[in-house]
Amino acid sequence: MAVPKERILPSPAQLQGDVGTEYGTILTPDALAFLASLHRQFDVRRRELLAAREARQARYDAGELPDFRADTLAIRESQWTVAPIPAALRDRRVEITGPVERKMIINALNSGAKVFMADFEDSSAPTFANQIDGQLNLRDAVNGSIEYTSPEGKPYRVNANPAVLVVRPRGWHLPERHITVDGEPMAGALVDFGLFAFHNARQLQGRDRGPYFYLPKLQAMEEAALWNEVMASAEAELDLPPDCMKATVLIETLPAVFQMHEILHALRGRVVGLNCGRWDYIFSYLKTFRAHRDRLLPDRGQVLMTVPFLKVYSELLIQTCHRRGAFAMGGMAAQIPIKGDEAANEAALAKVRADKLREVQAGHDGTWVAHPALVPVAQEVFDRYMPSPNQLGVMRADVCATRDQLIAPCSGSISRAGFDNNVEVALRYTASWLDGQGCVPIHHLMEDAATAEIARAQLWQWLHRGPLEFTDHAPIDFALFDHALATHTHRLIESGAPTAARAEQAAALLRQLTHADELGDFLTLAAYAQL
């Protein structure tokens, strides 16, 4: 007997490989059907937008320079504002970020920060176990049952009045090969967003807590519009009020800085702010200008937020956001406490204070830290100079950012120490990422995928856009890179660190990416096949 056509339901998303039976409460049939619906509605458009990125980069490689769009002038010049900001997000003076590991979630929620950004992206290595464990952990955090006991027997529980939860899914470019729909891998972004929304959105909405999201790696207003459509569809399917899902967008790509008004406009019913994603922004500058020898950058340690192209980027973000009634969030303080060396620790904290003072005096409404110990340091600065919940009234009418200012390279030098540090950071981070760790302390800085991307992109540019010299006039060449990589690989193996077993694998990948004729788009995309 034939089944009536109206009763034939589309197949849900399919799980690939051994994904573990313990994930059954997250990967339910209904949740997989929800994911499949998102994929079928939006993946074709997502792929079209990724192709548009490639076409845009090809034009930059051919000599075109990024600029403000002529076709969207009316959006930039007309008068409009975003929707009112929810009460829970009106004071965001300090936000802490970190991976979705159970103990870290509890510590971040208890840190005293106003907001915790739970990160499925740059600070997480996307093993399937990490991603689904993260969903389990966040579900337990939302329903109030999350707890953890360390191997030493120390209990961890969430205190009263925890930070407001905001979730960052993966960027549009990253796949999730363990979940397929109609034979195609899903977008990691739709998996992370979809599972979190399916299991937590109703409960969070009932408590006036969103759900709230951070959106990474956007390059154009059309990519923001796609997120708006995804969230609207999810709200309808989950029977939630329109625009209850709120978003903060990271301006962490060079193309996006020329479309900030447009990105806010595309999400104007649900956007609450933009964030200066400084490390990814520097990486995007390097990648955008990979073919432009006249736009090389010096040592990473010299590319600070006080250099002209970064200073004007942050000031334009403040001006744009406040004109539209949205928050302008500052960037990350990557320092972590230095135990056993009081002088060095105080010097590191002084850098944090100076950076946060610059942000609050410029007009930012809040800032990021990577370690709980930095929350009171950043908060003391913002409390002193921002007694009100935010600085939406600081309009920065003095800012007049031109295209040439936004793309001007900064002066500086390339040192042997800077070159060697890039090799070490890229190698050690890649080894840790392949071992399942996406947030790695190296030399008292919390390195994530963005800082590793800067390191390997600079190495590629210095080697392929030469001939270049160090400050001592010695040549920068592939022989030097190969020797440094071999030296640090040997040191990592000899260290006996948990990631030592991944040293050779990481070195081979880094060698391949650095010797390649073209700078690869993303380290994590190249490494995902080996994860």
Image (cartoon, grey):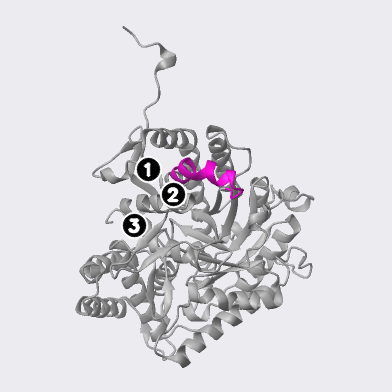
Do the residues bearing badges 1 and 2 touch, measured as CB atoms within 8 Å?
Answer: yes
Which residue lies at the image location 50% right of the left edge and 50% below the top edge? Answer: 53
Magenta stretch encompasses residue 47: no
Vertical comparison of 426 with 204: above or below = below
Location of the C terminus (image quadrant): bottom left
Residue that badge 2 annotates: 139
Q: Which residue shows up at 44% across the image and 48% down it? A: 192
Instruction: Please tell me whether mark 1 sits on a helix, a strand or a loop.
Output: loop
Alpha-carbon span between mark 1 and mark 3 = 28 Å
Query: What is the three-letter code of the residue carrying label 1?
Result: Ile
- Report the side of 266 relative to 484 (left or right): right
Q: Are marks 1 and 3 in contact (CB under 8 Å)?
A: no
Q: Which residues are magenta?
A: 194-210
Sequence-wise first label, 1 or 2: 1
Q: CA distance from mark 3 to mark 2?
A: 30 Å
Q: Quadrant of residue 31?
A: top left
**Residue 67 position within the rendered picture, expressed as x and y whole percent measured from the top left:** 64, 58
Q: Position of residue 393 (x, y in %)?
A: 78, 64
Which of the 4 image quarters holds residue 340? bottom left
Q: Which mark is residue 26?
A: 1
Q: Where the N terminus falls, by quadrant?
A: top left
Task: Please tell me which of labels 1 and 3 falls first in the chain.
Answer: 1
* Secondary structure beneath label 2: helix
